[in-house]
Image (spheres, rainbow, N blue to C red):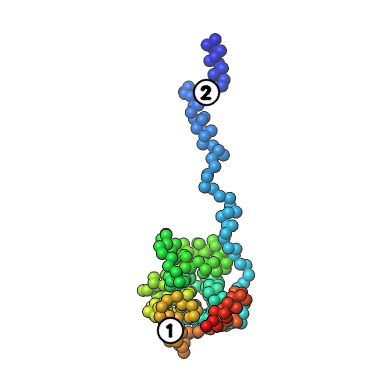
Amino acid sequence: MAKKSFSRRSLQHPKHTDSKGNSDSRKYRASKTEDPSNIYPLNSRPQQTETAYSPPRSERPFTAKTPAQQRYINAIKRNCLTFGIGPAGTGKSYCAGALAAEALQSGRIERIILTRPAVEAGEQLGFLPGDLDEKFAVYIEAFRDILNERLGAGTVNYNLRHGRIVAAPLAFMRGKTFGPDTFVVLDEAQNTTLAQMKMFLTRIGEDCKVVINGDVNQSDIRGPNGLADAVKRVEGLAGVYVHEFDRDDIVRSGLVRALIDRYETAG
């Protein structure tokens, strides 16, 4: 009886031995457990979800939507320093961002610098988590969308990692020099102080391209703003152009034009 019972157990649990007679049943069980086909990573995501929210890259060449935008584009191409002032929705930021992306892609420049004053629109956001880049990303997100559309999100991420696209608060521009082959965009310039604008303008070096955008009627700071002050001071300087958009140049939507009319004419 004992021999039969032993033979049944041997059939149910086979043992493998090597040339030295040692059992390798543990190796057998380990190989079954470590089979990659049996492992499913819990944090894996389908490939389509990785790009579901990435803005698609536009394959269309960048063109102006209005005659005013075309004049603004021509001014940026011809001048070292260009001011774009006017109401929201006229394409000031989009034109500057698209031209910067085009210049980087073509190799005419080596670096894009995006900056703006870290000023909230009428409310205090308080502490923002993360490092400096993550904190400032909140303020520069609109420009990143423009670059993603013109260059593709992957290209933008690569250039950000390698310093060819730099996004930094205006306060971090002190002590820097905008050298050759650099395209600099200062957005929301109506929120600069007079001292900040002077500091920024005196960073301009030889053969760089600088664009300053803003709406002097939408300042979120108290007292005079640096944009309105600078526009008066630069009048008549060689290599400087001030382009003014008006209500008829708004391309965002007809509703925005109507809303601006109501707000600007309200008593």
For the question of whether residue 229 can be seen, the reply is yes
Could you tell me which secondary element the residue under label 1 belongs to? helix
Packing grade of label 2 (10 A; few <14, some 14-19, many >=20) is few
Against 158, is 250 above or below?
Answer: below
Question: Which part of the image, by quadrant, shows the N terminus?
Answer: top right
**For the view shown, which residue lies furthest in the top direction?**
1
Instruction: Read off the residue under disc 2.
Output: 15
* Amino acid type, residue under disc 2 in the picture: Lys
Residue topped by disc 1: 229
Q: Which mark is residue 63?
A: none
170 and 154: which one is in front? 170
Q: Residue at x 58, y 77 (%)?
A: 259
Q: Is residue 19 visible?
A: no
Residue appearing at x 46%, y 62% in the figure? 161
Q: Is residue 54 left or right of residue 190?
A: right
Element type at mark 2:
loop
Amino acid tagged 1: Asp
Give percent across and percent down for residue 66: 61, 80
Q: In the image shown, does 77 or 146 lie closer to the viewer? A: 146
Relative image position of residue 127 (x, y in whole percent) = 40, 62
Q: Residue at x 56, y 21 (%)?
A: 12
Of residues 137 and 164, which is closer to you in this image? 137
